[in-house]
Image (cartoon, rainbow, N blue to C red):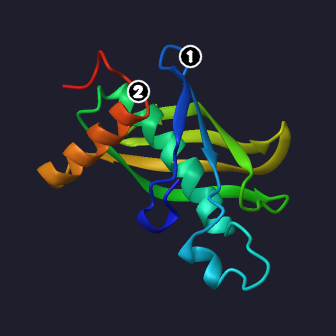
């Protein structure tokens, strides 16, 4: 996990397009510039970064549903609950399930767990668009390959 680059996911453990489910895993780094301000002497993973992890997990599901030929963009969140703190060294599991897909928007149900304990959950809405630049498409495809996703799908 490289927080300052929004490279949130370490690995994709489940990539099940047929059942509309993706599970990812990330270990919070012991050191990150983000902890210099959040909070000095008490490093805590920012809640917005937990939401971003759910966003990236949803992104893998939705991109996969479009054969990685289109890119999902965050459009909104409902029912967001942060239930506990996450500290450096903890390994998080993010689980995403498809709720609705249609009219250019996709809704997913998401949760983050640490050692089986529910840490955060949310309902995310994503819009799907063409890649705005070839560089971004290459970056997304490279990250997906690095995470072991969709080797048969990606160009």
Give me the residue at 53% from left, 59% from top. 76
Quadrant in which residue 133 is drawn: bottom left
Q: Is residue 130 visible?
A: no
Residue 19: assigned label: 1
Where is residue 119? Give x, y as percent: 80, 51
Work out whether 39 lies above or below 95.
below
Work out whether 46 lies above or below 58.
below
Give me the residue at 71% from left, 61% from top. 88
Task: Give the CA separation, mark 1 to mark 2.
Answer: 16 Å
Which residue is label 2 attached to? Answer: 149
Closer to the chain start, of discs 1 and 2, is: 1
Work out whether 45 lies above or below 15.
below
Q: Is residue 64 visible?
A: yes
- The secondary element bearing badge 2 is classed as loop
Quadrant in which residue 107 is drawn: top right
Residue that protrudes farthest toward the left in the picture: 134
The answer to whether 124 appears left or right of 87 in the picture is left
Where is residue 66? Give x, y as percent: 31, 29
- The secondary element bearing badge 1 is classed as loop
Where is residue 46? Give x, y as percent: 67, 69
* Nearer to us: label 1 or label 2: 2
Give me the residue at 29% from left, 20% from top. 153
The residue nearer to you, when weighing 44 against 81, is: 44
Q: Mark 1: few, some, or many residues within 10 Å (few <14, many ≥20)?
A: few
Work out whether 131 lies above or below 17.
below
Residue 102: assigned label: none
The answer to whether 137 appears left or right of 10 in the picture is left
């Amino acid at each position: 996990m490289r927080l300052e680059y929004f490279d949130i996911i370490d690995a994709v453990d489940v990539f099940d397009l047929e059942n509309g489910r993706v599970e990812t895993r990330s270990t919070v780094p012991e050191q990150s510039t983000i902890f210099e301000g959040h909070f000095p002497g008490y490093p805590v993973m920012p809640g917005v970064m937990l939401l971003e992890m759910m966003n990236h997990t949803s992104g893998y599901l939705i991109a996969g549903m479009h054969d990685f030929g289109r890119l999902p963009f965050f459009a909104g969140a409902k029912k967001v609950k942060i239930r506990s703190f996450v500290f450096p060294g903890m390994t998080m599991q993010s689980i995403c399930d498809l709720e609705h897909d249609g009219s250019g928007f996709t809704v997913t149900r998401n949760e983050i767990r640490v050692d089986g304990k529910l840490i955060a959950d949310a309902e995310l809405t994503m819009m799907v668009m063409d890649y705005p630049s070839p560089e971004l498409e290459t970056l997304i495809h490279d990250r997906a390959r690095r995470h072991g996703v969709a080797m048969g799908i990606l160009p």
